[in-house]
Image (cartoon, rainbow, N blue to C red):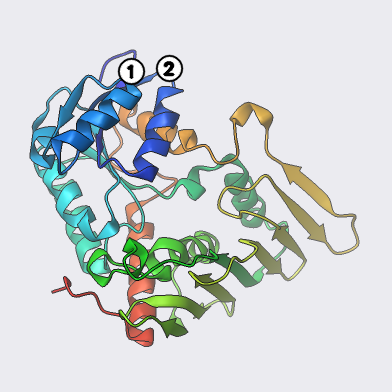
Amino acid sequence: MTAQSVRWGILATGGIAAAFTGALVDLPDAEVVAVASRTEASAKGFAERFGIPRAYGDWASLAADEDVDVVYVATPHSAHRAAAGLCLEAGRDVLCEKAFTLNAREAGELVALARAHDRFLMEAMWMYCHPLVRRLKALVDDGAIGEIRTVQADFGLAGPFPPSHRLRDPAQGGGALLDLGVYPVSFAQLLLGEPSEVAARAVLSEEGVDLQTGAVLSFDSGALATVHCSLTGGTPVAASVTGSAGRIDVPDGFFFPERFVLHRDGRDPQEFTADPADGPRDTLRHEAGEVMRALRAGERESPLVPLDGSLAVMRTLDAVRERIGVRYPNEA
């Protein structure tokens, strides 16, 4: 890391890796210096696309590259434990895509590795870094709607996804829950913390992954959260937080919102909109910026995406999977 820029390595070359690298290219204090894939051809193609100077056909070479300050792990979540662990053990700081890992055990192992090697580690929960989501949380924390009674959130895609797709592949941690359901669960836990009880039902595919899942999360405060995810139907991707003195509605794209509306008893609705200066609503640059801010400050985790919060979300996802009967073949 230099005074001018943070040097990034990209591990994997899929769609989310391309989106994140595109965001980094737009940041003047970020420099993408290397990329790795399982094949040299894939890495070279990605490097040529984004003007990255070094391309590796294996993960270990990227992890060993001492010119890399931080590695962005963008593999399917079934490989997060192996990829992020390799980088942490080699002394690299890591931003790891969500879902953080396949399960809470693997997530705990990554956190332990990061702390043992004194490295920065953060789950790439970009929602938590979004300026409008941060504004919503601040309002709730300040008591704008009183005590939270309910949280509702959904994320569904219409598909259809064929059995060969990674979202249907148990070996890759397929199913709606870890890819999509992690957002509604993380939204609820951002506002309410970890639930004390979890109930869930799902429709499973022939391969044994969840095509759609609904869950009710209960909290010691008396609040309830209802969350839903689906690979079989496009949902509004909306969220609502109801309190004892009002409600906040996020009508579209709750994890990268363009606006939300605050309803308070006896007052006119108040709309909050994204600042155009923050860039496109779907930008990942706020997440990248938070990583670079933390690295420059010498922090080992982000206060916006704390590791204990990521572990709590993984425990909830584990509990949901236990109740719906989904287990992956590569889990111990």
The structure residue drawn at horizontal position 43% and vertical position 66%, both measured from the top left corner, is 161
Q: Quadrant of the N terminus?
A: top left
Horizontal arrangement in the rendering, residue 263 relative to residue 94 (left or right): right
Nearer to us in this view, 35 or 129: 35
Above or below, 207 against 243 in this view is: below
Q: Tell me, for residue 39, which label it has, or none.
A: none
On the image, numbered disc 2 is attached to which residue? 28
Nearer to us in this view, 29 or 326: 326
- Quadrant position of residue 44: top left
- Quadrant position of residue 327: bottom left
Q: Residue 316's spot in the image, x, y percent?
A: 38, 73
The structure residue drawn at horizontal position 68% and vertical position 33%, both measured from the top left corner, is 275
- Quadrant position of residue 198: bottom left
Q: Residue 122's spot in the image, x, y percent?
A: 32, 46
- Please name the amino acid that badge 1 sits on: Ser
The structure residue drawn at horizontal position 37% and vertical position 37%, both measured from the top left corner, is 18
| Crowd around label 2: few <14 · some 14–19 · many ≥20 (10 Å) | few
Choose the circle earlier in sequence order: 1 or 2. Answer: 1
Question: Does dot 1 land on a helix, a strand or a loop?
Answer: loop
Above or below, 258 against 214 in this view is: above
The count of marks equals 2
Horizontal arrangement in the rendering, residue 40 relative to residue 187 (left or right): left
The reply to whether residue 48 is visible in this rendering is yes
Q: Quadrant of the C terminus?
A: bottom left
On the image, numbered disc 1 is attached to which residue? 5
- Please name the amino acid that badge 2 sits on: Pro
The structure residue drawn at horizontal position 37% and vertical position 32%, both measured from the top left corner, is 21
